[in-house]
Image (cartoon, rainbow, N blue to C red):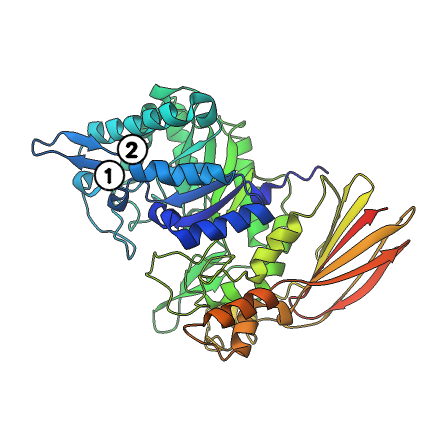
Amino acid sequence: MENDQYFKKCVAFGRATEGLRADFQEQMRELQRDIGFSYVRFHGIFHDDMAVYDEDENGNPIYWFGYVDKLIDFLLSVHIRPFLELAFMPIQLATVPNTTFWWKANGCPPTDYQKWHDLVRATILHLTERYGEEELKTWYFEIWNEPNLDSFFQGTQQEYFRLYTVTAEAVKSVCPDYKVGGPSTSGADFRDGLGYLKEFIRYASENHLPVDFFCAHPYPTCWALDGDGSERMGYISKDICLQFLDNIRAIVDSSPYPDAEIMLTEWNSSPSPRDLVHDTPFMASFLLYNYTQNYGKVDSLGYWTFTDIFEENGPGRSPFHGGFGLINVDNVKKPSYWAFWMLNQLGEEILEVGQDYVVARSGDNYQVIIWNYCYYTDEFADGDRSKLSETKREEIFQNKELTVELSLKLQGTYDQTVYTLDEDTSAYHNWLKLGAPQYPTAAQVKTMQETSRPKTEHSTVQAFHIRQTLCPHEVKCYILNKR
């Protein structure tokens, strides 16, 4: 099976202006050096802090793209293209202001659809003039974010369909080959059998609308009511991602748009930027399991987000506050980062995938990753978070050892390197060893950066047979290069 590397087709960050920060750009340079994602998605290209849209005293539009240019110039300089979400509404076009986020996004239809059309068209024209039509043909233009949630779109489904129609026409009026897509629905749509997506497909087909890709957000969580009637976050099942991806694949294949790409533009273990699970070693095995079990189903499963420099709920007040990021605010790499790094070591041919391993090859060289994926306890999955705290995060998992046995038929001598992720290499645990400081010193940050990376062992082998017992959440990556 070909390794399509869909895991790194797209990654994400919070909002456009965060991408102008020096610390953000330092992290993205390292991310691209180590992994090399193809596209990056983010909110807020039309938010007022990007200063794209204004009006004069007579209500005539004024456009300015200075910050947009600086952001996209940087992204292209580190070899990552924008997956451009066309949202949110500028305040002067917003029917409902300040619907979501600490940074006050305006999730709503426009007061004037013609002005919105003209804004989108002017933006696409400017980008075309600056970067060239051939370059923009490779980009993706995603029309809005999660319109099935009131906080992101305070309008009806039909109003979103109108917004999609107007926006797609504006993009395609510049070049018909530019790629547009939607409806970018939240995880609620997956839990509801993708009814919103199905209705979108029906509407688009009946009205002959262009849809070059479908996008949605398959978060594996739900919000059940407890005994007191309070909403709490739960986790559906270990294999829900597999079911969600099978479902959307079947819907698109049987639709009038069977050749459209499936670009899932947000995904993580949960949609909460304060989920303390995100910092733990669990995340490495979670990612390895889910990405390897879903080869060939979708074109991207975009990780939300690569960095904890992220302010939807305001700045995180602890170095390990449960942020989405692969990297924390101090540029310390979490276990999730190294899971992506290991996936990136796999060669172009996937030879075998199991529940707890993957074997790949590149020419005469082999790559093997094994992991111990310990899922949540039933109590935690059902929403009982009483055993989870800032400094205690282990008791929520079904912790057990796992023995993995694998063999390869080698011919010749191989240089073998083994990379190990465990509790000792966990950024979060290394922070605890320093006393869990809220404001780490430069020396403490350096210590965490140096210790929070895989252990490495080198040897020379002529045979490969392992019977490896793994601790909870432990991961090992074997790289075998023929001499």
Residue neighbourhood size for the residue with mark 2, other residues' Cα within 10 Å, grouped as few (<14), some (14–19), many (≥20): many
Which badge, 2 or 1, comes first in the chain's sequence? Answer: 1
Q: Distance between the residues labelled 2 and 1?
A: 7 Å
The amino acid marked with disc number 1 is Pro
Q: Read off the residue under disc 2.
A: 163
Residue closest to the eye, 33 or 359: 33
Is any part of residue 61 visible from this angle?
Answer: yes
Residue 208 is left or right of residue 409, and the answer is left
Residue drawn 55% across and 62% down?
Answer: 334
Give left or right: position of 123 versus 180: left
Q: Mark 1 points at which residue?
A: 109
Q: Position of residue 60 (x, y in %)?
A: 13, 29
Residues at circles 2 and 1 in contact by the CB criterion of under 8 Å: yes
Q: Residue at x 60, y 60 (%)?
A: 284
Image coords of residue 425 (percent x, y): 62, 68
Residue type indicated by callout 2? Leu
Quadrant of the rendering where the N terminus is positioned: top right
